[in-house]
Amino acid sequence: MEASRTAKSGHHLFQENPMLAYELHQIRSAELRRQAADARLAREAVRFRRAARRAETTGGAAEPDGAHTAGRGGRRLPRPA
């Protein structure tokens, strides 16, 4: 009962102060963007390590080809049905 009362009072607080809800949304969005950037960096580091190992065994260049690191550059278009 106590938890439902605090949840209702928190919801009421957002209704009274929409800027608070907006600012919390901005904070959550920024955190999600940071997590996505960290995940991208981790994937890129793994890609570079794999390319370096591959280059050691084949004697090629240590950098992966540019096609993998260039990125998409924009949003994907929806696929037709």
Image: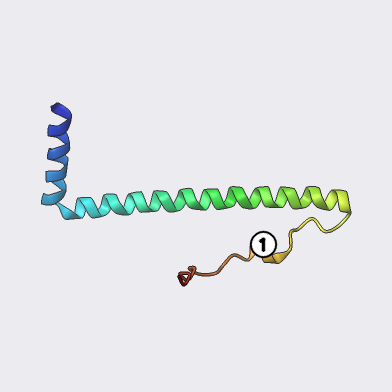
Q: Is residue 14 left or right of residue 37?
A: left
Q: Quadrant of residue 4?
A: top left
- Asked if residue 13 is positioned above or below residue 18 in the image, the reply reads above
Q: Which residue is mark 1?
A: 68
Residue 40: x and y, percent?
56, 52
**Residue found 79% across the figure and 55% down from its top:** 62
Q: How is the image coloured?
A: rainbow
**Residue found 49% across the figure and 51% down from its top:** 36
Residue 33: x and y, percent?
44, 53
Quadrant of image for the C terminus: bottom left
Label 1 residue SS: helix
Q: Nearer the viewer, residue 76 or 38?
A: 76
Residue lying furthest top in this view?
1
Quadrant of image for the N terminus: top left
Residue 5: x and y, percent?
12, 33
Count of numbered badges drawn on the protein: 1
**Residue found 63% across the figure and 66% down from its top:** 70
Q: Is residue 39 left or right of residue 21?
A: right
Q: Circle 1: is it few (<14), some (14-19), or many (20+) Cα within 10 Å?
A: few
Q: Is residue 5 left or right of residue 80?
A: left
**Residue found 26% across the figure and 53% down from its top:** 23
Residue type indicated by callout 1? His
Residue 13: x and y, percent?
13, 45
Q: Nearer the viewer, residue 14 or 81?
A: 81
Residue lying furthest right in this view?
59
Residue lying furthest front in this view?
81
